[in-house]
């Protein structure tokens, strides 16, 4: 069966467990005060869309897109469960987030992630997908524990995506 990425309303207990797992992982690998991941209530905000990835009925990962402005979004809460690593879950969720950003007409897609070995696979994924380092954005401040990245979304590509149909929330 193929990996399925779907828009999620964060209602299922197993989705809550995955978000809690993500938060615990972030707190376990980041210094106090440097975790910017969102809990379930934060992910339910009106300016955030949340997706889950499923394989054979099993929840494998998640990711979110936060609206920063009419032309920019931020990737939030990307997570792949350990049992689902190297199955393409992160790539599939990232692809869906990028498609949504393009449909919305965003020119820039930002993210913040941590430093150290636990964050290296995520950084490698983002670099493979055209993200580059940048300075802090939004309300973030630069620290030794944060990595900021941006992907510039091509205007022609955004226009083609817009023709494909209205954005999904």
Image: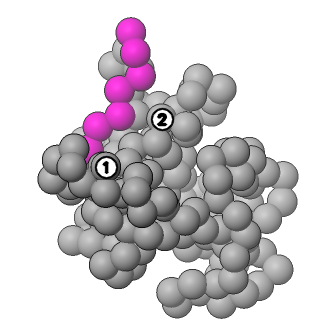
Q: Residue furthest front?
A: 156
Q: Taking 147 as reference, is 97 above or below it?
A: above
**Which residues are drawn in magenta?**
1-11
The percent position of residue 160, horizontal first and vertical second, equals 31, 49
Left or right: 119, with 129 as reference point: right
Which quarter of the figure has residue 6?
top left
Residue with the mark numbered 2: 92
Q: How many residues crowd around disc 1 within 10 Å: few (fewer than 14), some, or many (20 or more)?
A: few
Left or right: 134, with 24 as reference point: right
* Quarter of the picture holding the N terminus: top left
Residue with the mark numbered 1: 160
> Considering only order in the chain, which callout, 2 or 1, is on the residue closer to the N terminus?
2
Inter-mark Cα distance, 1 to 2:
20 Å
Query: Which residue is drawn at the image coordinates 39% and 43% (left, top)?
Result: 96
Q: Is residue 17 visible?
A: no
Q: Is residue 71 visible?
A: yes
Which quarter of the figure has residue 7?
top left
Mark 1, secondary structure of its residue: helix
Left or right: 117, with 18 as reference point: right
Query: Which residue is drawn at the image coordinates 84% and 52% (left, top)?
Result: 117
The percent position of residue 37, horizontal first and vertical second, equals 52, 67
Q: Nearer the viewer, residue 14 or 86?
A: 86
């Amino acid at each position: 069966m193929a990996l399925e990425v779907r828009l999620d309303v964060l209602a299922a207990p197993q989705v809550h467990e995955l978000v809690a797992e993500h938060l615990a992982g972030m707190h376990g690998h980041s210094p106090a005060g440097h975790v910017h991941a969102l809990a379930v209530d934060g992910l339910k905000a009106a300016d955030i869309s949340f997706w889950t990835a499923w394989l054979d009925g099993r929840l494998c990962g998640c990711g979110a897109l936060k609206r920063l402005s009419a032309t920019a979004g931020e990737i939030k809460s990307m997570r792949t469960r350990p049992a689902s690593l190297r199955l393409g879950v992160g790539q599939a969720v990232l692809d869906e987030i990028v498609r949504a950003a393009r449909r919305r007409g965003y020119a820039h897609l930002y993210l913040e992630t941590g430093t150290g070995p636990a964050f290296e696979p995520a950084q490698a994924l983002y670099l493979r997908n055209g993200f580059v380092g940048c300075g802090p954005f939004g309300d973030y401040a630069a620290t030794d524990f944060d990595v900021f990245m941006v992907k510039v979304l091509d205007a022609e590509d955004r226009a083609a995506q817009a023709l494909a149909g209205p954005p999904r929330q």
